Image (tube, rainbow, N blue to C red):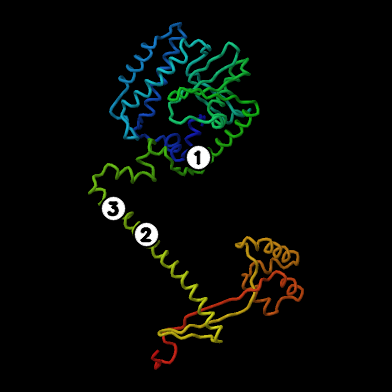
């Protein structure tokens, strides 16, 4: 496969969409979003502007904007969909009109640099063996009087990138590699994005080192895509872009949503998937509520257990009787091992593990539970040297247990 920036970008943003679009080539009606429609019309108008300029003709502003109006009306159709329902197609038309007006005012008479090519196809290999190939099209390629080549791209996005983001952009930098192989005297290159809705130019200059790094990174991305093709592993990745995806209706993450969105309220509530999801959500909420109640009960039980132990110790008791159940109370002085879960004990835990490894018994005891190792120590069954060495790391610990006995496990004649 010959890759392009858009193909790689699709793979990175959602591998499943990449599969649908470029591997399976699923035949599905394409969704023409208003954002894509606006971008295409503005791009077409600017391309026509510079075509005329190459022929020695400079449009007036009225001719320029009339061409935009005529093209918009000609290409407009009823299937254009708008995700942001608060806006109309006319709102987007006015956005384009304002952007093109500002562009004309800023660059007229369009002679600060010479246009070399429009929609210039770029084909390049990222390696000497022609194994990893990239192709694409440059919106406009120009050259300044000072000999700087300019790769220009038109954007109608509503997000202006930072300088850092522009310097990491892959697309135009790949085109730079391409034109530097296609033409001589192309050492000086500027990458320029026209963010038309902001009337802003965003520029980036790449060094030879930057381009070499880009080649390697792009090859790695291609290898990831090829591995996905080989293993047929294309996980979907949800994002804000899903609403604009052509494959929304067949995506396993969105298919049910696509089915229920057009339903009337009554039909929506009767849909089997909705019924199941609602029932599960109810049960999930109840379980969460019960867990919260259990947590509160356990917290109170801990407090009561402390009081029971205090009471039992005060009067030398091991069992306390209630109306329906007796409680067995056990207090035992023992040891425990330092643990990684307590931050202050982590160094001591590491020292203990090092000691056991240096003693040559790590393999023997690493499978033991901490409690079992403590039991062996207390029973005195460990080797004398290990018994002494381990004692340095054990932490005195008091185990307090309150265990309920069976109901009425004492004299049944006891009235209480």
Q: Position of residue 359 (x, y in %)?
A: 75, 67
Task: Give the residue at mark 3.
Answer: 272
Q: Earlier in the sequence, mark 3 or mark 2?
A: 3
The answer to whether residue 393 is left or right of residue 147 is right
Disc 2 packing (10 Å; few <14; some 14–19; many ≥20): few
Q: Which residue is at 70% across, 79% downward?
A: 380
Task: Give the residue at mark 2.
Answer: 285
The answer to whether residue 62 is left or right of residue 140 is left
- Residue 277 vertical placement versus 218 (above, below): below
Give me the C-alpha separation between circle 3 and circle 2.
20 Å
Q: Which residue is at 37% across, 39% downward?
A: 248
Q: What is the total number of numbered labels drawn onto the structure image?
A: 3
Nearer-the-camera pick, 136 or 245: 245
Disc 1 packing (10 Å; few <14; some 14–19; many ≥20): some
Proximity of marks 1 and 2: CB atoms separated by less than 8 Å: no
Q: Earlier in the sequence, mark 3 or mark 1?
A: 1
Proximity of marks 3 and 1: CB atoms separated by less than 8 Å: no
Q: Earlier in the sequence, mark 1 or mark 2?
A: 1
Give me the C-alpha separation between circle 1 and circle 2.
41 Å
Image quadrant in which you'd find residue 382:
bottom right
Q: Position of residue 79 (x, y in %)?
A: 30, 30
Q: Residue furthest top?
A: 56
- Residue 332 vertical placement versus 81 (above, below): below
Give me the C-alpha separation between circle 3 and circle 1.
35 Å
Disc 3 packing (10 Å; few <14; some 14–19; many ≥20): few
**Secondary structure type for disc 2:** helix
Q: Which residue is at 35% across, 44% downward?
A: 255
């Amino acid at each position: 496969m010959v890759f392009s920036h858009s193909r790689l970008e699709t793979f990175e943003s959602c591998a499943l969409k990449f599969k649908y679009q470029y591997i399976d080539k699923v035949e599905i009606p394409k969704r023409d979003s208003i954002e894509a429609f606006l971008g295409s019309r503005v791009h077409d108008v600017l391309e026509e502007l510079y075509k005329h300029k190459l022929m020695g003709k400079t449009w007036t502003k009225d001719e320029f904007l009339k061409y935009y109006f005529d093209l918009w009306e000609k290409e407009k159709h009823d299937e254009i969909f708008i995700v942001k329902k608060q806006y109309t197609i006319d709102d987007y038309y006015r956005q384009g009109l304002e952007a093109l007006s500002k562009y004309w005012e800023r660059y007229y008479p369009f002679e600060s640099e010479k246009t070399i090519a429009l929609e210039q196809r770029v084909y390049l290999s990222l390696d000497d063996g022609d194994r990893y190939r990239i192709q694409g099209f440059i919106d406009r390629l120009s050259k300044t009087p000072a000999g700087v080549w300019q790769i220009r791209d038109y954007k109608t996005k509503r997000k202006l990138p930072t300088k850092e983001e522009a310097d990491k952009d892959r697309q135009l930098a790949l085109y730079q590699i391409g034109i530097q192989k296609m033409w001589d005297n192309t050492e000086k290159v500027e990458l320029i994005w026209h963010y038309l809705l902001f009337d802003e130019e965003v520029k980036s200059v790449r060094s030879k080192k930057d381009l070499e790094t880009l080649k390697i990174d792009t090859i790695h991305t291609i290898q990831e895509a090829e591995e996905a093709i080989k293993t047929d592993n294309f996980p979907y990745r949800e994002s804000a872009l899903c609403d604009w995806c052509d494959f929304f209706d067949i995506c396993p993450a969105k298919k049910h949503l696509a089915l229920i969105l057009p339903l009337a309220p009554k039909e929506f509530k009767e849909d089997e998937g909705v019924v199941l999801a609602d029932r599960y959500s109810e049960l999930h909420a109840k379980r969460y509520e019960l867990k919260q109640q259990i947590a509160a009960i356990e917290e109170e039980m801990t407090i009561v257990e402390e009081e029971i132990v205090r009471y039992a110790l005060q009067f030398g008791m091991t069992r306390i009787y209630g109306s329906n159940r007796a409680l067995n109370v056990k207090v035992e002085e023992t040891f425990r091992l330092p643990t990684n879960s307590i931050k202050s004990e982590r160094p001591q835990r590491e020292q203990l593990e090092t000691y056991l490894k240096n003693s040559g018994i790590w393999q023997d005891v690493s499978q033991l539970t901490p409690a079992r190792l403590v039991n062996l120590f207390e029973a005195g069954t460990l080797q004398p040297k290990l018994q002494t060495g381990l004692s340095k790391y054990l932490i005195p610990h008091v185990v307090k247990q309150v265990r309920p006995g069976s109901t009425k496990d004492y004299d049944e004649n006891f009235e209480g």
